[in-house]
């Protein structure tokens, strides 16, 4: 994954660390020995694209860029010392976007924009340049939909993050003279002061660890030897300032000294420690050829890596390898066909990854692969498919096939689902009484009563002439007719339990 750094974040929140490569430790424990150790100078070409709002004062534009360059050359003076040559190009829009004020839906969209329009150039191994886009504002939405804005943006080299895709640098024209030094620091393998180094590389940040567990953001200004102040920006966000002291260039804390009124408004001194200077010099050596020239192919990084952060960054029929165990991370790849190994459904053209293999949309291996109201059926043409669950009375072979969740003697059956007079196959399907179907439910019957106990309290079973028409009736009150001439055993029909018999046949 790409690890990116910035200076003077508009909201002061640290971008969550994304160190996930399984080969990270191996890459970070490699040495810095280089054939370029004996060369004194690292001559770097920079190409600035000025997209700021103010176009009226070219001299001011040049002076601002020149102040950035002078500070970077002063800070990176350890052998091989940094020497910069530069060109400036003026552009206002690219691909329909206003370069002075860039806003994106997310970091992936920004990365794609920079990759397509402001990539570092390597015409040959020793001919090329780093591209730097200068604007007024850069913002995008994080995963929670909250907008974040940045003062600068750059990428780490492979020695910090393996398989990294190095794109051009973005700089805010309103930032202080240390901004270019900070962003080039990331290219020269320097992390922010509050971030740990991994492996056996120089541990340059051990003195800056934040000891305030209740406010981790204070680590952004932990290098300050003056007063740490929290200030508000015009957009409502906050930032840290080191008032009357010196801070480190690789933190998120601007050093300020007092003006003639006593207010802390003037840019103060910021430094790199000896460890950082040596580490950056070692990285510059890695970017040099054996004859002492800058290797722009190495500076450009792996082509085609880091193209995406989500599937939406890719074309139709492709998926983004971000978050998938794959050494060629963050690239768009064609979706996989049925039968191909997979770890997530995002990889499959069918949008279904079943038991580690891309499957057809309706293909399954277990009921859990199917949605609610479906079950995994028996194989047809060599595959199992999701089918609608069966209604009561349908032929079945297992409980999971039935909507009621029960398959009884080959038929879907729901207990206590039929009222008196409704069709049934089994006695327990009747809420009251019994089912007239033969044992085994091979044919349907009807819910009827056969004796009073088949009915609820206060009822009696009226068998009538045809037992199939049996029905439960409410017991009779005193004086109600309870029998007819020639009938016997009518007492159970009456609430009192007594029927008078001939000639009236009335309940007592």
Image (spheres, rainbow, N blue to C red):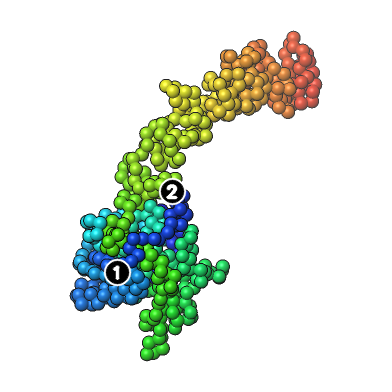
Q: Secondary structure at mark 1?
A: strand
Residue depicted at 26% across the width and 54% down the height:
116
Sort mark 1 into few (<14), some (14-19) or many (20+) by Cα contacts within 10 Å. Answer: many
Q: Residue furthest bottom?
A: 260
Check disc 2 and report its element: helix, strand or loop: loop
Mark sitting on residue 323: 2
Q: Is residue 122 above or below residue 237?
A: above
Task: Judge left or right: residue 145 versus residue 468.
Answer: left
Residue 40 x, y percent position in the rendering? 31, 70
Mark positioned earlier in the residue sequence (2 or 1): 1
Rendered location of residue 119, percent (x, y)? 27, 58
Q: Which mark is residue 92?
A: none
Query: Residue at the spot x=49%, y=25% of the render?
Result: 377
Would you say residue 160 is visible in this rendering? Answer: no
The local crowd at label 2, few if under 14, some if 14 to 19, many if 20 or more residues have their Cα within 10 Å, is few
If the image is split into quadrants, where does the C terminus sit? top right
Name the residue at 33% across, 63% down.
36
Q: Residue at x 37, y 49 (%)?
A: 330
Residue at label 1?
41
Indicate the quadrant where residue 87 lies: bottom left
Out of 471 and 213, give the one closest to the viewer.
213
Q: Position of residue 500 (x, y in %)?
A: 79, 18
Query: Which one is in front, 122 or 380?
Result: 122
Q: Is residue 420 above or below residue 135?
A: above
Q: Position of residue 65 (x, y in %)?
A: 26, 73
Kindly report which numbered mark, 2 or 1, lies closer to the viewer in this rendering.
1
């Amino acid at each position: 994954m790409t690890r990116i750094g910035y200076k003077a974040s508009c909201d002061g929140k640290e971008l969550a660390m994304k160190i996930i490569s399984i080969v990270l430790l191996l890459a970070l424990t490699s040495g810095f020995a280089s054939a370029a150790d004996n060369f004194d100078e690292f001559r770097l070409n920079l190409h600035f694209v000025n997209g700021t709002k103010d176009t009226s004062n070219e001299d001011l534009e040049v002076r601002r860029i020149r102040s950035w360059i002078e500070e970077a050359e002063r800070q990176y003076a350890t052998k091989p010392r940094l020497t910069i040559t530069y060109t400036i190009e003026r552009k206002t829009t690219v691909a329909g976007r206003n370069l002075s004020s860039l806003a994106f839906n997310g970091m992936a969209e920004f990365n794609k924009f920079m990759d397509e329009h402001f990539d570092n150039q390597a015409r040959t191994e020793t001919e090329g340049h780093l591209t730097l886009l200068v604007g007024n504002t850069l913002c995008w939405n994080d995963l929670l939909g909250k907008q974040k804005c940045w003062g600068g943006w750059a990428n780490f080299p492979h020695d910090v993050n393996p398989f990294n895709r190095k794109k051009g640098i973005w700089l805010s024209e309103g930032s202080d003279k240390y901004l270019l030094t900070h962003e080039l620091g990331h290219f020269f393998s320097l992390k922010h002061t509050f971030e740990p180094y991994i492996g056996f590389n120089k541990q340059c940040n051990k003195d800056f660890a934040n000891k305030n567990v209740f406010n981790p953001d204070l680590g952004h200004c932990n290098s300050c030897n003056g007063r740490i102040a929290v200030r508000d920006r015009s957009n409502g966000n906050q930032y840290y300032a080191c008032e009357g002291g010196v801070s480190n260039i690789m933190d998120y804390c601007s050093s300020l000294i007092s003006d003639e009124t006593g207010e802390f408004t003037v840019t103060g001194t910021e430094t790199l420690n000896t460890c950082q200077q040596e580490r950056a010099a070692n990285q510059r050596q890695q970017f040099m050829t054996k004859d002492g020239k800058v290797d722009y192919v190495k500076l450009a990084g792996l082509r085609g890596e880091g193209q995406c952060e989500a599937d939406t960054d890719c074309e139709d029929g492709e998926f983004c390898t971000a978050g998938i165990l794959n050494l060629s991370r963050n690239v768009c790849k064609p979706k996989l066909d049925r039968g191909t190994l997979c770890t997530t459904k995002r990889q499959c053209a069918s949008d279904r990854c079943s038991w580690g293999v891309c499957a057809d949309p309706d293909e399954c291996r277990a009921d859990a692969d199917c949605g609610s109201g479906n079950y995994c059926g028996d194989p047809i043409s060599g595959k199992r498919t999701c089918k609608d669950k069966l209604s009561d009375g349908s032929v079945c072979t297992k409980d999971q096939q039935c909507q009621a969740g029960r398959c009884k003697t080959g038929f879907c059956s729901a207990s206590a689902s039929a009222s008196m007079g409704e069709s049934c196959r089994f006695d327990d399907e009747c809420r009251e009484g019994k089912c007239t179907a033969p044992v085994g439910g091979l044919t349907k019957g009807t819910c009827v009563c056969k004796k009073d106990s088949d009915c609820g309290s206060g009822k009696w079973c009226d068998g009538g002439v045809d037992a199939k028409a049996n029905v439960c009736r409410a017991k009779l009150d005193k004086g109600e007719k309870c029998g007819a001439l020639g009938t016997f055993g009518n007492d159970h029909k009456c609430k009192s339990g007594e029927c008078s018999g001939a000639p009236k046949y009335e309940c007592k």
